[in-house]
Image (tube, helix red, strand yellow):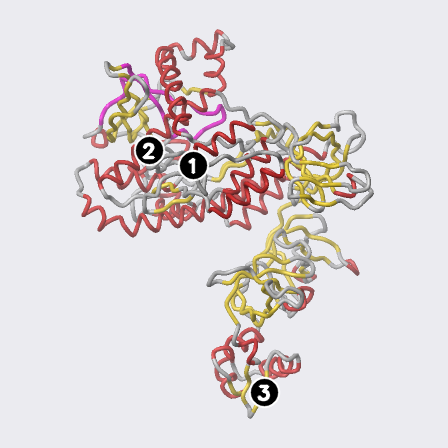
């Protein structure tokens, strides 16, 4: 914190004399100079030897976090809650995103209802930034931070670390000034060219505090875990090694934490969902557990993963590899002929997977496109696959009756070459095998949450609350402008009513707009220690039980359920795990948000890198896309391969365009309009790999 900020923080508590300030901050000439400058600028007043903040501002000062900084303005979010404050550039006083500041509220000169503010002091500094190194006047270097590219941070020549313009780098602020161009930064890390997605992703991971490398204590603890399972570990476990149990995952998956089995019973079906018993190896109080909680989740992007657990566990002893004995935690579900779950039991167990099933191969088996070699690989589980497919059909029908929503998110599959460059982007296909495993996992997750709620034990629930009425009103307005009606009986539609809307537009030009609009109207799913149900899945009980290798909440509830299965009483479990469940819920929710942001930004960088090869007049640089959203400055177009880019308003028309009802751009002079859901042929015109941005122009 700079000396001026320290002075204002002290004076904000109460007026201070020079002697008091020197006693607090040190008998330094800097204190005197700073006081003189602050007084001259009107930020402090002096009377009878006492320094104070002017009354009007001091009365409305509040603690805020800077959430956005652009070229000439910024926004501060009050810590106590309430709308963001608009901060004019002159009043930012060099504050940067992530800074905690003391801000004085004032009335907007043009809009009395729009809160405006002024930064009085930076209370807590965010001094680490990643971005792109650029050359400014006089050949000097500066960093254009990823969080605010317009706030160029000058780099001290003596601390540039050999960085060059065009590189991705991380810097730390060495000196703080009153304006952004008065800051001075030093380069702490260089990642490589900002034109290559792999280097940009390294910067994303660094900024998020994510690393593939584990602390030495964690690696040593993982190494000490024996690879072989002992007789002592098998004691008291259900032995399912004689059952035809097997995994079904994507071909590239190496951390397989779920396997399935199925049997016909007189009443219907017995489904086994067998999950890696990670809690057996990751014990409370261990270095492994502390690191897993800190990471919260594995992070997946392109062909890479930042694992939650060391590979010795995630790809080794915990992964349900084909032909190897593995310790598991099994959910055994009894279902009737219609697919309704009638009973569920949990038990620690041991399995041996018969085959590593692959989604694409099983889909080919079911649609008649499998080769002889593929059919031979699955011969040992052929009857079980047929029975699973039969059960899946009934579960899918029940899901539709229940009204669970299926939002098309447009997941992409990226292909990288040997040098890590993106050479292909395709929309990831989901077949019956993927949907079947999802249904089986939903059953186990629901059973775990239902048991915990009924027994009153501490737990980590997956919660998705119903949307707020004001968000639904905004959704209805947008849909009406596009000619779509949302039919619902109440102020807030049921999941079933929203599911009907999604199905109505699925496969049409309006699919992206409607599905994205519904998604944005939803509350964010999160982890909580109290059961509140899952609105989107139309389930009253839900938790995450099936992926303890990849998610900490699953590991946490395994630990609690294992003790319940061993005979622990609810009261004892509450005393032991109540605080733990609350901590795991909060930490896991934070880590999930961080992971999703990194995964989204990394994917955007790779997509931009892929599209760069098409720039120019090449014959293959013509794409048929759909307008996915519109803004005052242009229209976003999504290609069939999921790449999205901006067609700027100036490229659409030489006339000014009007944004109408947030769903169309209208040219009043020609009568032409560009509406969400319309098809548009485009060419790739420019990309910014570092920012993950693609610019299109009309092809016609």
Other residues around mark 2 within 10 Å, as few (<14) / some (14–19) / many (≥20): many
Q: Relative to residue 457, is residue 631 drawn left or right?
A: right
Viewer-nearest residue: 60 or 697:
60
Point out which mark residue 446 bears. 2
Disc 2 vs disc 3: which is toward the camera? 2
The C terminus lies in which quarter of the figure? top right
Q: Earlier in the sequence, mark 2 or mark 3?
A: 3
Give percent across and percent down for residue 696. 73, 37
Label 3 sits on a secondary structure element that is: strand
Question: Disc 1 or 2, which lies upstream in sequence?
Answer: 2
Q: CA distance from mark 2 to mark 3?
A: 66 Å
Quadrant assignment, res 234: top left
Tell me if label 1 and label 2 are in contact, CB under 8 Å.
Answer: no
| Image position of 627 with respect to 294: above or below | above
Q: Is residue 286 magenta?
A: no
Region rendered in magenta: 238-264
Residue 447 x/y as whole percent: 29, 32
Q: Is residue 169 left or right of residue 124?
A: right
Q: Position of residue 62 (x, y in %)?
A: 51, 69
* Percent x, y of residue 262: 31, 18
Identify the residue at the far top of this view.
372
In-image side of 640 versus 134 (left or right):
left
Residue 489 left/right relative to 625:
left
Graded by Cα atoms within 10 Å as few (under 14), some (14 to 19) or many (20 or more), the crowding at tag 1 reads some
Is 42 drawn above or below residue 502 in the view shown? Answer: below
The numbered dot on residue 46 is: 3
Q: Give the farthest residue toward the front.
A: 489
């Amino acid at each position: 914190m700079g000396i001026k900020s320290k002075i204002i923080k002290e004076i904000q508590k109460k007026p201070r004399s020079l002697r008091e300030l020197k006693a607090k901050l040190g008998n330094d000439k800097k204190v005197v100079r700073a006081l003189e400058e602050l007084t001259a600028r009107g930020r402090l007043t002096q009377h009878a030897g006492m320094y104070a903040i002017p009354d009007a501002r001091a009365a409305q000062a509040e603690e805020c976090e800077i959430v956005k900084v652009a070229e000439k303005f910024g926004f501060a979010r009050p810590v106590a809650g309430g709308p963001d404050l608009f901060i004019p550039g002159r009043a930012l006083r060099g504050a940067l995103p992530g800074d905690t500041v003391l801000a004085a509220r004032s009335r907007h000169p043009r809009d009395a209802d729009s809160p405006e503010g002024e930064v009085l002091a930076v209370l807590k500094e965010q001094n680490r930034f990643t971005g792109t190194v650029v050359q400014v006047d006089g050949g000097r270097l500066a960093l254009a931070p990823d969080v605010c590219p317009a706030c160029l941070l000058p780099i001290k020549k003596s601390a540039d670390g050999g960085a060059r313009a065009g590189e991705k780098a991380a810097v730390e602020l060495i000196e703080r000034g009153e304006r952004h161009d008065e800051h001075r930064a030093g380069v702490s890390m260089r990642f490589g060219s900002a034109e290559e997605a792999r280097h940009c992703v390294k910067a994303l991971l660094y900024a998020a505090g994510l690393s593939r490398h584990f602390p030495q204590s964690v690696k040593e603890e993982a190494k000490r875990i024996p690879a072989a399972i002992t007789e002592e570990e098998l004691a008291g476990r259900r032995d399912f090694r004689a059952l035809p149990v097997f995994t079904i995952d994507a071909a590239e998956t190496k951390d397989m934490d779920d396997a399935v089995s199925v049997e016909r019973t007189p009443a219907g079906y017995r489904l086994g969902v067998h999950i890696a018993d990670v809690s057996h190896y990751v014990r409370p109080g261990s270095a492994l557990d502390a690191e897993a909680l800190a990471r919260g989740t594995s992070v997946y992007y392109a062909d890479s993963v930042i694992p939650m657990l060391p590979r010795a566990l995630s790809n080794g002893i915990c992964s349900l590899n084909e032909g190897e004995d593995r310790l598991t935690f099994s959910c055994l579900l009894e279902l009737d002929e219609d697919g309704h779950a009638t009973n569920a039991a949990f038990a620690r167990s041991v399995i041996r997977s018969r085959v590593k099933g692959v989604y694409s191969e099983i889909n080919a088996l079911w649609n008649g496109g499998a080769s002889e070699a593929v059919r031979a690989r699955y011969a040992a589980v052929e009857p079980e696959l047929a029975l699973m497919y039969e059960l899946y059909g009934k579960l899918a029908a029940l899901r539709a009756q229940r009204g669970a929503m299926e939002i098309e998110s447009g997941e992409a599959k990226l292909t990288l070459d040997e040098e890590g460059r993106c050479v292909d982007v395709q929309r990831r296909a989901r077949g019956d095998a993927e949907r079947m495993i999802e249904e089986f996992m939903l059953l186990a997750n629901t059973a775990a949450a239902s048991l915990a709620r009924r027994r009153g034990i501490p737990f980590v629930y997956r919660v998705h609350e119903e949307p707020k009425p004001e968000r639904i009103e905004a959704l209805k307005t947008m849909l009406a402008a596009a000619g779509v009606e949302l039919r619902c009986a109440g102020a807030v539609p049921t999941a079933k009513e929203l599911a009907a809307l999604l199905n109505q537009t699925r496969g049409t030009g309006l699919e992206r707009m409607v599905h994205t609009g519904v998604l944005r109207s939803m509350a964010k799913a999160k982890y909580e220690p109290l059961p509140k149900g899952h609105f989107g899945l139309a389930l009253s009980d839900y938790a995450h039980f099936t992926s303890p290798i990849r998610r900490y909440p699953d590991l946490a509830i395994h630990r609690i359920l294992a003790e319940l299965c061993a005979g622990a009483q609810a009261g004892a479990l509450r005393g032991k795990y109540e605080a733990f469940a609350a901590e795991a819920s909060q930490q896991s929710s934070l880590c999930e948000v961080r992971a999703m942001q990194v995964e989204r930004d990394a994917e955007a960088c790779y997509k931009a890198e892929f599209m760069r090869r098409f720039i120019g007049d090449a014959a293959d640089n013509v794409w048929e896309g759909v307008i996915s959203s519109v803004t005052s400055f242009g229209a976003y177009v999504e290609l069939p391969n999921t790449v999205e880019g901006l067609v700027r308003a100036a490229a659409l028309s030489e006339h000014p365009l009007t944004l109408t009802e947030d769903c169309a751009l209208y040219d009043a002079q020609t009568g032409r309009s560009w509406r969400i859901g319309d098809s548009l042929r485009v060419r790739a015109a420019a990309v910014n790999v570092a920012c993950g941005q693609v610019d299109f122009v009309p092809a016609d």
